[in-house]
Image (cartoon, rainbow, N blue to C red):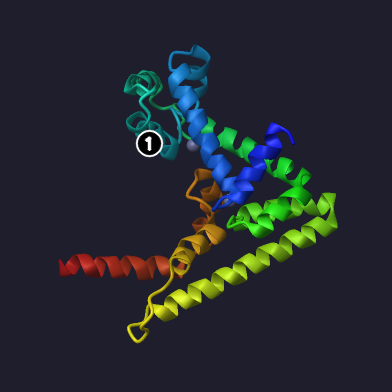
Amino acid sequence: MDALDIYLSEAFERDGCPVCTLLRNFEEKTLTTLLYEHPNDPSLIEELKKGLGLCPYHSWKALELTSKNPLIDPLSIAVIYERMLDHYLRNWDNADGNRCMICTMSREKEETLIDAIADRMKELLNRYEESPAILCRKHFQMLLERTKKLDKKHAARLEAIQKLKGEKLQRLLKAFIEKSSYLHDEGPTEEEILSIRQTILLLKGEPLPINQESFLGAESRGRSPWKRRLSFRFQGKNSKG
Ligand SMILES: [Zn+2]
Ligand SMILES: [Zn+2]
C-alpha cells in the first residue's frame, strides 16, 4: 500500500463524500500555502491579476483562514489585494474578474482524484460498502463513467452499493418525518436526524464552488416558475413589515 492508497482508503472510511472531503482539504491547504509562502511572489501576483484575485468564495475563505490559522498573517491578504486594487485602478475598463486559480486547481485535482479512485476501485468498493461514506451524485456519476471504461463488473457493483445507500437514507428520512409528528411518542434517532444532512450531501455534494458550476447559468436556459412565486412571497413578508 502506498501513501495514495492509504489517503484514499481513509477518505472512503469516513462520513461524507470522499471526493468532496478530499477537495475541501486540498482547497484549504492550497489557500494556506498561497497565503503563507507566496504573498510577494511576482509570478503569483501576475497570475492573480487575471481574475482580480480569487473568486468571491475563495477570497472570503482566505480572509476566514486568517482568523482560524495563526500561521497566516492578515498582512498576506492585504499585500495581495492591494496589488489587485492597484491593477484594477490602472485598468479600469479592461480589468477582468472572472478567473480563480484555486477553482482551476480544484477542477484539475477533481479529475486526478477520480482517475486514482477508478484505478483502485476493487479495493475501495470493499471499504465503501461497509462505511458511512456516501458519494455525492456528481462524483458518483464521474466515477461510474470512468469505472465503466476500466471494468464493467466494478461499475455494476458501485451502482448497486450507491443504490442501497440511497434507499437506506430514504428509510431513515421517512422515519424522521414520521417521528417528528406530534402524534408520535418516540423522537427520531440521531441517525434519522443526520439523514437530512446526508440526503442533501448525496444529491448536491458539499458547498464547494466546484459543485456549483453546473447550476450557474441554468436559469438562462429556461424561466423558472418558482422565481416569481418566491419573490412574491418574500415581497409579501416585507410589506407586512
Ligand atoms: Zn462529492
Ligand atoms: Zn475559486
Picture mark count: 1
* In this rendering, position of residue 17 left or right of residue 56: right
* In this rendering, position of residue 156 left or right of residue 222: right
Occupied quadrant, residue 168: bottom right
Question: Could you say which is closer to the camera, residue 70 or residue 237?
Answer: 70
Question: How far from the left and from the top, in percent, is residue 129?
Answer: 68, 59
Image point 61% across, 58% down: which residue? 137
Question: How far from the left and from the top, in percent, is residue 174?
Answer: 49, 77
Residue 184 lies, with reference to residue 201, above or below; the image says below
Image point 54% across, 49% down: which residue? 211
- Position of the N terminus, as image quadrant, is top right
Q: Amino acid at mark 1?
A: Trp
Q: Residue lying furthest bottom in this view?
A: 183
Question: How far from the left and from the top, in percent, is residue 195?
Answer: 49, 66
* In this rendering, position of residue 195 left or right of residue 235: right
Question: How far from the left and from the top, in percent, is residue 28?
Answer: 48, 34
* In this rendering, position of residue 5 left or right of residue 152: left
Residue 173 lies, with reference to residue 94, above or below; the image says below
For disc 1, the marked residue is 60
Mark 1 vs ligand 2: CB under 8 Å? no
User: Callout 1: 10 Å neighbours few (<14), some, many (20+)?
Assistant: few
Image point 38% across, 25% down: which residue? 92
Occupied quadrant, residue 138: bottom right
Question: Could you say which is closer to the camera, residue 103 or residue 71?
Answer: 71
Q: Is residue 68 in sight in this rendering? A: yes
Question: Could you say which is closer to the camera, residue 223 or residue 120?
Answer: 120
- Position of the C terminus, as image quadrant, is bottom left
Q: Is residue 221 in sight in this rendering? A: no
**Element class at badge 1:** helix
Occupied quadrant, residue 230: bottom left
Image point 38% across, 29% down: which residue? 69
